[in-house]
Image (cartoon, helix red, strand yellow):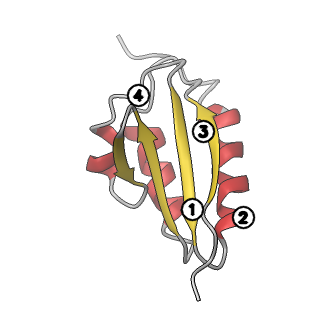
Amino acid sequence: MTSAIQHCTVTVRNPEGLHMRPADKLVRTATGFQCQLELERAGQIADCRSILSLLTLGASQGCELILRAQGPDAIEAIQVIRLMFDQQFDESHVEPTA
């Protein structure tokens, strides 16, 4: 039996977009869930457990992504990851590098 796919739209709020630091946090969080997790931008799909896959999305600030999860803990995963995006991956206090 397969579980239904859960999905929502998330917005990249970080001034520098979905760069290495937030992508690393996302990968570390995604690996804690059993479900399959992916982000989609303009038809391009990225595995949330692959930092390289996430970085290839080229998601800049303001970019909307579709977050999808399928598996036993999909609802929880969606809630946790949506919150990470809403809270800018806890980077709102980080100064941009020159």
> Which residue is denoted by mark 1 in the rendering?
69
Is label 3 or label 4 in front? 4
> Gap in Å between the C-alphas at discs 4 and 2?
23 Å
* Amino acid identity at mark 4: Ala
Residue drawn at (48%, 40%) of the image: 22
Labels 4 and 2: the sequence-earlier one: 4
* Amino acid identity at mark 2: Ile
The correct choice, above or below, for 9 with respect to 93 in the image is below
Mark 4 closeness class: few <14, some 14–19, many ≥20 residues within 10 Å: many
> Which residue is denoted by mark 2 in the rendering?
75
Mark 1 and mark 2 in contact (Cβ < 8 Å)? yes
Mark 3 and mark 1 in contact (Cβ < 8 Å)? no
Labels 1 and 4: the sequence-earlier one: 4
Image quarter of the N terminus: bottom right
Mark 4 and mark 3 in contact (Cβ < 8 Å)? no
Query: As drawn, is 41 to the left or to the right of 33?
Result: left
The correct choice, above or below, for 41 with respect to 77 in the image is above
Is label 2 or label 3 in front? 2
Tell me the number on the disc at residue 59.
4
* Amino acid identity at mark 3: Phe
> Which residue is denoted by mark 3 in the rendering?
89
Say which of 29 and 78 sits in front.
78
Tell me the number on the disc at residue 58.
none
> Gap in Å between the C-alphas at discs 3 and 4?
14 Å
Secondary element under disc 3, as helix, strand or loop, is helix
